[in-house]
Every structure is written in structure tokens, then in C-alpha cells.
Image (cartoon, grey):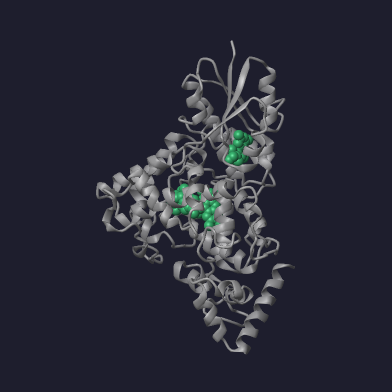
Amino acid sequence: MSGNLILILGDQLSPELSSLRQGDRMADRVLMAEVMAEATYVAHHKKKIAFVFSAMRHFAQDLRDDGWRVDYVALDDPGNTGTLRGEVERALASGGIDRVLVTEPGEWRLLDEMSRWPGTDLIADDRFIADRHGFVRWAEERKTLRMEHFYRLMRRKTGLLMEGDQPAGGRWNFDADNRKPPAPDMEVPAPPRFAPDEVTQAVLDLVAKRFPENFGTLEPFGFAVTRADAEAALDHFIEHALPHFGAYQDAMVGGQPFLFHAVVSPYLNAGLLDPLEICRRVETAWQGGWVPLNSAEGFIRQIIGWREFVRAIYWWKMPGYERSNVLDASRPLPWFYWSGQTDMACVSACVNQTRDEAYAHHIQRLMVTGNFALLAGVDPHALHEWYLAVYADAYEWVELPNTVGMSQYADGGLLASKPYVASGAYIDRMSDYCGSCRFKVKAKSGPDACPFNLLYWDFIARHRTRLAGNPRMGQMVATWDRFSPDRQQQVRREAGAFLATLDQ
Ligand code: FAD
Ligand code: DLZ
């Protein structure tokens, strides 16, 4: 008897996956494979590899329990060829296979490769709300792209937080009520941690043995690796953290890596949770009076707005987007992005937390590590490889546009309407990092000046011509222009001296 081979990748762990929906439990075989090519195309954080392998192993068992015949190739299995192509060829060599079915992979490099595999059908990945082909038609009709316009379409398409054709509460966006600095007495709920079972423990041993030099602390390991546990994590978030999510979305507190964030991106991106289901549960919590509208709306916007928007841009602009560099930034990534050893307390805290948790929340990524790299002129491609490696939720379709577009302005403003740069004052307002820093956030120049202060004005000066033409940056350029020549020279000299220390 013959049938198809359904190849399922490490971020396709969804029972309703399009390839499974086309398959037949009786005739077809599922193939899942841990391969060195995927585990090493960037030097992933140890926790990320452990999360993906353990979630894959649990999902394979779920499929078996559901009546599928699953061939699972573990990394240490004798004969493992090391590549997805090699594993598919091995399966084909055993005979009885008509076609290979794969839901389209989330990264362009794999889609490009698989589109050249013989006998292979690539099936659209419909776990997203926006149709990426439809997005291109929509985008090409406009002069400028703004997420807010796209988001309104997604609200109308899903009906989330809608009252007829109008947004619930009379506004599309409640960010004016958000972005509060951390309150000194706020109580922060810890997200649940899941003790490793035997399957996860075997994976932890494997990762410790095979990837000893990779960045990151492997244990304690507390990620959910099953759908049931991912749902428990979501429930915990909705009950304990979501009510404060909106207000403190941009806050940063030393020793509190998660604050009121959901910490669901690894589960969502691997397929353990479904974006629309998450949003419907959040909407229900708002309807039940459990969650204020500013939190529910802010959260839903991240998922049906930003997450979908960056994915659509990725597929529209790939290949080529990964080499965007309109600001000609070329500095190598400073070593402290790996070691955490820098006197800048904010950068050190974010890198150390990243090392320990394979997690940082959005503002830590955007306004600390991203902001510093942009101000310092770090090569966006080197930074992209860092973000892709160090976070448990990182896949190129979501990481690359966030890094190259949103954080580094390397696409010239396609994704973000202005460069996300800020001086130390922003970090001081939104965090408690500066209190313990050896630099003085209030000092604008001199040996104790916060490097973000020096680099901010140096950045404005270096890119003055481009920024002067941006309506959201013109005021800062005008402020720089009003600095006395002596002050301008001092800032540039001190910024240059600081930047030189990065290259040593
Ligand atoms: P919450 O703050 O609780 O938000 C809820 C959900 O909204 C997230 O789980 C995520 O699915 C979605 N979301 C929020 N912001 C974004 C966004 N900008 N883009 C896409 N989805 C968003 N997110 C990833 O999933 N993978 C990445 O590799 C990734 N790389 C990033 C790199 C940079 C430089 C920046 C600035 C952001 C990046 N993000 C990435 C977006 C965001 O930082 C994470 O989605 C978020 O921190 C995940 O934590 P959370 O689940 O607690 O999110
Ligand atoms: C991230 C990852 C890792 C570390 N390992 C594997 C693997 O061994 N096998 C696999 O099928 N998938 C893995 N993944 C996820 C893939 O890299 C992901 O499917 C592609 O990057 C497409 O998004």
C-alpha cells in the first residue's frame, strides 16, 4: 500500500496543521526529525533547542495517540543524516511513498530549498489571520505602510473587540492609557514554570552534551512543552497579569524579567497555541469584566496587529530584506551582547536575563539592546543573527522584520515611521536600571555621562540629513542644531571615544 509522507517541522506543532488536514491517518506517514542543520543554522540558545526538541517529541506522541503513524528521528539516532532533505530521502528510500506534503516553512531559506525538492507539495500555512499574498496587493496600493491601518482591517476581519462596524469603547487604540513607568509597590505575578518530565529531561541531557558551547543557561528549564501546559500558562496570564498588561507594557524592572507580559511567544510560534484562540479568550475576559479594555486591546493589537504585520512584510520583502542597511551601520556586535559584561546596568540586565531565560520583553529588546545597537551603528545583520539565536521565540519571519525594520530602521522606514532611538532619560523613566548604574543618567557629558545620552546626539548628528526629512524626528534635529558649536564638538568627541572602546 502506498501513501504520502507528511513532514512536520519544529515550529509546526499544531494538530490542525494544513498538511495534516490534507493527510490520511490510514495511508500516510508523518516524519519529524531533529537535525543538526536546523539546530546550528544560528547558534541557538540552549533553552531554545531544548524547548523545540522536547515540544517536538511530545507532539509526535500526541499524533500517535491520535492514530497517526509517526517516524521520529532523534538527534542522536544512528543514521541521522543531519538535514531535513536527508531525512526525507531516507524515508523515500524505504519505499511506498507517493508524495511529500509539507506545510510551508516559516523561513524563506527553507521554503526556497523545499520548493526545489522533487515530488513535494508545499501547502499554505493557514495558522495566521492575514493572507500574505493579499497583503502585498493591499501594501502596493499605498504610499506609506502603517501598522495601525492594517490592524483595523484585522479587527474588522476577526470581529475582535468590535461593536458592529465600530471599535469597542469608541477607539481603536488605547495606548494613551498605557506606557506607565513601574510603580514602586507593584506586585508582579510570576509566570508558571513546568517541571521537566522524563522526555524533557532526556532532551536537556542531549542539549547539555551536544551544545555545551552555545549561549545560555540550560537549567532550570521551566517552559511548557505541551499544548495543555501552554494553555495553562495562557490561563495564568489572563487571570493574573493581563489586567495590568496595558498599563505596564513598557515598564522594565531589574530582577523581574516577565512583569505583566504573557510569555507565550515560544508556544504561539511553535504552534502549541493558536493566535485567534488566544485573542478570543482575552476578549472573553474583557467581556466578563475581568480585564480593562486598554489591556485587552493592547494585547490583541500585538497579536493580530504587529505579529501579522511583521510576517506579511517578511514574506513581501524576502529575499533581500535580511541585507537591508540604509544607515550603512558596520560596527561588529559588541562582545557584551554575549557576556553581559558592561558597566551599562540596563544592557547588562537585559543580556543576563536573556542568557538565563531565553526571554526579554518587547521594550527590553527594542529600547535597550536594540536602541544601543542602533545608536552605536552596529551592523544590522550581525544583530539579526544575535536576536535569532538568543530568544526561545525566534524564527526569522518574526525576528527579522522586528530587528531590521522596527528596531534598526535599516529598511529606511518601511516598517517603522521613525528610528526607535532614545537617550538615557527614557530608560530611566521606564525602568529602575539607572539607580544602580555606574554611569549617571542625568550627566550629558563628561566621564560619568550615560553612553545613551552621548550616543543619542551623535546619532542625530551622523544622520542629520536623513532625519531632518522625517516629521517625527525634525524637532530633535532642530534641538541639535541649536546646540553651541562647542557643545556639539564635545558630544561628538566623547561619543567617539566611547565608541572606540567598543572596538577594543
Ligand atoms: P507580550 O508582550 O505578552 O505580547 C503578546 C504577544 O504579542 C507575543 O507573545 C507576541 O506573539 C505578540 N507580539 C508582541 N509584539 C510583537 C511584535 N513586535 N512582533 C510580533 N509579535 C509581537 N517576537 C517573536 O515572537 N519572535 C522574535 O524572534 C522576536 N524578535 C524580536 C526582536 C526585536 C529586536 C524586537 C524589538 C521584538 C521582537 N519580537 C519577537 C517581538 C516581541 O518582543 C515578542 O513577541 C515579545 O517580547 C514576546 O513576549 P511575550 O509573549 O511575553 O509578549
Ligand atoms: C528551531 C529548530 C531547531 C533548533 N531544530 C529543529 C529540528 O531539528 N527539526 C525541525 O524540524 N525544526 C527545528 N527547528 C525549527 C525550524 O528551524 C523551523 O521550522 C524553520 O526555521 C522554519 O521556521
Q: In the rendered view of the protein, which quadrant contains the C terminus?
A: bottom right
Say which of 361 and 284 sits in front: 284
Identify which residue, 132 or 346, lies in the foreground: 132
Image height of 361 relative to 128, above or below: below
Tell me which corner region of the image, top left, top right, bottom left or bottom right, holds residue 70. top right
Residue depicted at x 55% and y 32%? 56
Q: Nearer the viewer, residue 126 or 277?
A: 126
Q: Position of residue 325 (x, y in %)?
A: 65, 60
Name the image quarter holding the N terminus: top right
Considering every residue shown, the one lying at the far right of the view is 504
Q: Does residue 171 show up?
A: yes
x and y percent of residue 36 in the render? Answer: 69, 36
Residue 358 visible in image: no
Q: What residue do we see at 40% from left, 39% from top?
A: 232
Horizontal relation, residue 432 to residue 211: left or right: left
Which percent across, then down, holds residue 388? 61, 49
Q: Residue at x 46, y 29 (%)?
A: 15
Query: Which residue appears farthest toward the front when viewing the image?
Result: 141
Quadrant of the picture in which ligand 2 is shown: top right
| Number of marks in picture | 0
Q: Whole-percent x and y of residue 456?
A: 57, 74
Report whether 287 appears left or right of 391: left
Q: Is residue 205 above or below residue 190?
A: above
Above or below, 344 against 50 in this view is below
